[in-house]
Amino acid sequence: GQCQLFVFSSSFNSGYPQPKMSGSSDDTRNCTATPPYLPPTAIDTTERLRILRHHMQSHNLSAYIIPATDAHMSEYIAERDKRLAWMTGFTGSSGTGVVTLQKAALFTDSRYWIQAERQMDCNWELQKSGWISAIGQWLVKEVPEGEKIGLDPYLFSIDNWDSYLQALDGSNRTLVALDDNLVDLVWGSQRPLPPTNTIYQLPDDFIGSTWQEKVSHIRTQMENHSGKPTAVLLSGLEETAWLFNLRGDDIPYTPVFYAYTLLTKTSISLFVNQSRLSGDASQALAAGCPGPLCVTVVDYEAISESLRIYVQQDGVHIWIGTEYTTLALYREIPPEKRLEENYSPVMIAKASKNAKEQELMRAAHVRDAIAVIRYLVWLEKMVPSGSVDEISGANFVNQLRREELFCHGPSFETISASGLNAALAHYSPSNTTSRKLTVDEMYLLDSGGQYLDGTTDITRTVQWGEPTALQKEAYTRVLMGNIDLSRLVFPPRTSGRMVEVLARRPLWEVGLNYGHGTGHGIGNFLSVHEWPVGFQSNNVPLDKGMFTSIEPGYYLEGEFGIRLEDVALVVEAQTKYPVHEEPYLTFEVVSLVPYARNLIDINLLSQEQIQYINSYYESIRKYIGPELQRRHLDEEYQWLQRNTQPLSRSSLLAASLGTLAMGTVASTLLPGA
Ligand SMILES: *[C@@H]1O[C@H](CO)[C@@H](O)[C@H](O)[C@H]1NC(C)=O
Ligand SMILES: *[C@@H]1O[C@H](CO)[C@@H](O)[C@H](O)[C@H]1NC(C)=O
Ligand SMILES: *[C@@H]1O[C@H](CO)[C@@H](O)[C@H](O)[C@H]1NC(C)=O
Ligand SMILES: *[C@@H]1O[C@H](CO)[C@@H](O)[C@H](O)[C@H]1NC(C)=O
Ligand SMILES: *[C@@H]1O[C@H](CO)[C@@H](O)[C@H](O)[C@H]1NC(C)=O
Ligand SMILES: *[C@@H]1O[C@H](CO)[C@@H](O)[C@H](O)[C@H]1NC(C)=O
């Protein structure tokens, strides 16, 4: 799935088709009309802003910054943390609100401009950039010299705080971290309460190692570190969930719960609402008490206070990751007692999956492939009759996943996009935008599931009718890029940034490109976008046991969008010449769904690429075929056989002659013909 974390080159906007302000103009606001026109989807924020400004004045603030994240820098957030959405009306997952005594502005990148125009009233101006430097420039323009800009230090990572300081450096405007969140004061009793659902243990069959083993491993890392840390602070929700093999349902799409962890050489403190832990979970955490493997459960809200007390001791040193630790907690630690790295050792340990975790991920991907294949077979039958739209399709594929063993729902909001909608990055269908699927348009499905054994994320693009020459060429080139990166052999710890160009090369060759990242890490029943693995400059180098998506695409504004996304595991490669130190690496693709045969122009493929597809298809037959047979999914089994027939230049020629003879619709029902 595409996500807010994808940044290509130096700009969010580069390469994305710029959304046209077309379509029915009465679904977007018009603030120049008199009176201003507001669509029914816009929220009236006048009263909220009035009260917020009142609080700003009593704190002597000229501006207040409202980010879109929570106190754990989560990608998806709970209703309770949707302060930006509540204040502005804008529900996109990426953006920043800035309110001065006279003005209010939403800063967001091009993926969200249309949505913002639909959801905001005319109190808010739309600033078409998501960059902190742009926010800084605006603040310098709007806030007089010598005045103060407020923020909630629990909602800013150290890295973000530093970026704001830099943006305002030398401007004589002061950033002030406040104890109160001013939006919460306005929201008051209307604000949703903290979640109370049960936090549960991951069953033994689904864990890669016990939490005691994980704790020991992290303590070894501490012992071995030249910075001599005495403790590790975990702020990311996935870090605590992973470390203790616990899961919860506090946040949509990601099975985590609100918590912090302070792990020292001799003690373990888990900051969570104790009464939410299941009986088994409480028991497991207390099994090693008293002793260094005893987990003490402390109130979630007590984290700052506990940190303050811990750092009063002599000789303590807390290891923190600057991308996930918030300013509020950072400030509790005196500078000489901080050990700062980009990521905590837990983040790094979690990134490389052990043999058991790899096996679990593979198993989840087999069941996930079956759900997707069932969906593709169903679409082939239903689309020609005109009875499927983007929303009903998304609902159906979500339902098929839920029928699979161990499924806990989707891993992100399903992107089900037909025709020109697929060209909008980050599109998800809504009642106002949902298009009917037809044999005349390409259709893009980017979806994934949460299973107890693994998280999945796959994108396939299909076309049931006759593709245009450009569609076919673009699809083939996207596929070539996917293959070239997937079959790459590289030395250990190569940076993803260095090799991602391979996914773009077949597109670049003819002047095409895509404006998003090439892939992201993924967890075992954790986040679908799992940092810090991926192909961007701020990702860690690729190493054995890491899973990443590989997802090149191509988008033509107003026409169509193509993306082919697979999840791949980094494995050892066999090289012709022996490698003296550590073995070289390559990828093993674990997503097991065939590509669209009618969209592949085999004449563009090299012999190596054809061989690669054929051996990939052999794996699909080997892992998926028997499972379809076991379940008596005969139609799906036949479909799989047809769609995984080996490609060769002559067979494709025969297929395209067949297509001509049979006419478009008939041939689409027999894609392997
Ligand atoms: C907004 O309203 C003004 C005044 O009625 C009109 O001139 C303008 O074209 C409208 N803009 C859009 C984008 O509809
Ligand atoms: C705001 O400024 C006034 C006047 O300078 C001062 O008396 C007051 O204490 C300040 N309030 C806060 C919350 O800083
Ligand atoms: C900052 O701005 C205030 C108000 O204009 C002014 O009094 C003060 O001298 C300025 N400080 C600096 C360092 O420029
Ligand atoms: C300890 O650190 C050294 C030097 O950085 C490294 O070579 C070694 O592998 C580390 N040992 C462990 C158990 O992490
Ligand atoms: C802790 O969880 C319980 C439910 O298990 C809930 O009733 C209580 O309000 C929660 N406490 C806090 C401080 O959120
Ligand atoms: C979309 O339409 C469906 C079916 O008519 C309805 O149940 C649902 O509430 C609508 N959703 C929104 C957000 O309007």
Image (cartoon, helix red, strand yellow):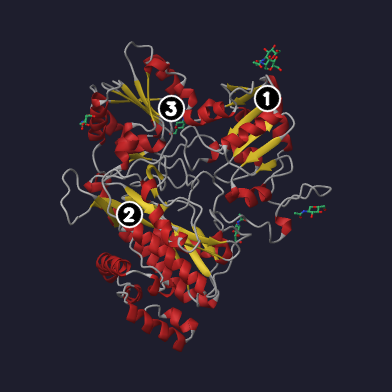
- Give the residue at x 69% y 27%: 143
- Image location (x, y in percent) of residue 559: 58, 66
CA distance separating discs 2 and 3: 36 Å
- Image location (x, y in percent) of residue 426: 53, 53
Mark 3 lies on residue:
300
Considering only vertical position in the picture, is 545 above or below 387? above
Q: Nearer the viewer, residue 208 or 64?
A: 64
Which mark identifies residue 56? 1
- Image location (x, y in percent) of residue 212: 24, 33
SS at mark 2 in the image: strand
Residue 572 in the figure: left or right of residue 178: left
Judge the density around disc 1: few (<14), some (14-19), many (≥20) Cα neighbours within 10 Å.
Answer: many
Asked if residue 44 shows in the view, the reply is yes
- Give the residue at x 30% y 46%: 546
Considering only vertical position in the picture, is 260 above or below 118? above
Mark 2 lies on residue:
568
Amino acid type, callout 2: Ala
Looking at the image, is mark 2 or mark 1 earlier in the sequence? 1
